[in-house]
Image (cartoon, rainbow, N blue to C red):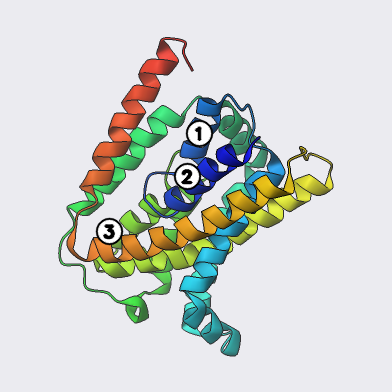
Amino acid sequence: MDKFEAFVLGIIQGLTEFLPISSTGHLFLGRFAFGLEEAGLFLDTMLHIGTLVAVLVFYQKELHHMIRHPFSKLTWILVLGTVPAVIIGLSFEDFFDSISKSGSTIGWEFLATGLIMFMADGVKNGHKKLDDISYTDALVIGSFQAAAIFPALSRSGLTIAAGLFRKLDRETAAYFSFLLSTPAILGGIVFQGKEMMSGHVEAISFSSLAVGTVTAAVFGYLAIVSMVNFLKKHSLKIFSYYVWALGILILILQFSGVM
């Protein structure tokens, strides 16, 4: 893998981790476009570290608060929001690993992501701010995050949608969705680290790793800022239309034998 390919994959990871269009699904498509069967576990891990850096920088105030007050309500709603994904991910690890590698379901998953966001966008009168999020809200949003273990179900799309269903205002739904991504991304890095310790690592140059990681961090931060501001005044429907078009295209390519 050369530095250009790592750069493009870094952009894809950084943007699509937080835009509600599925990072895993787009990375699969990026690898397909470059003719790469795998991006390499080490690179994939470093790309996730890049997006983790973006989240840590953006949410440094909230994270400092949780470090100083480890038993605060904010800490507990993040824990509760993370538990469903941990349970589902560990219980069905082999199943999700196999469908993620095959990519056979991503067309349908893009369509489902669009439908869920379209339905959530029609919910009106959301008023809850971050301090108003209940433990039940956190569990419901976390359950949607657990469903997004499927490769092309967008984690950010589903958690933002769940927030809107639970009457969070649009900005807060995006804000909490991205904050909730912190333990999710960290957990993914730990899981991938375990695989690397088992020897499942492909050789890749340090320069390509550095390019991919930095690119993912920069574009991840830009995506967080952009989405939080975008949803203050705009609709999720534009992302629904995009993933619907992409899902239909993928299904056509799969049924025709191209993918």
Q: Secondary structure at mark 3?
A: helix
User: Which label's residue is closer to the chain start, 3 or 1?
Assistant: 1
User: Which label's residue is closer to the chain start, 1 or 2?
Assistant: 2
Q: Are marks 3 and 2 in contact (CB under 8 Å)?
A: no
User: What amino acid does circle 2 point to?
Assistant: Ile
Q: Residue at x 47, y 28 (%)?
A: 105
Foreground residue, 208 or 66? 208
User: What amino acid does circle 1 point to?
Assistant: Gly
* Label 1 packing within 10 angstroms: few (<14), some (14-19), many (20+): some
Label 1 sits on residue:
30
**Quadrant in the picture for the N terminus:** top right
Q: In the figure, residue 176 lies in which quadrant?
A: bottom left
Label 2 sits on residue:
12
Q: Residue furthest bottom?
A: 68
Distance (Cα) linking label 3 and label 1: 32 Å
Foreground residue, 62 or 135? 62
**In front: mark 3 or mark 2?**
2
Residue 42 placement, left or right of 26: right
Q: Residue at x 32, y 60 (%)?
A: 227
**Can you say whether 33 is above or below 252 in the image?**
below
* Label 3 packing within 10 angstroms: few (<14), some (14-19), many (20+): many
Q: Position of residue 61 (x, y in %)?
A: 48, 82
Label 3 sits on residue:
165
Q: In the figure, residue 96 lies in which quadrant?
A: top right
**Can you say whether 53 is above or below 66 in the image?**
above
| Disc ID at residue 258 | none
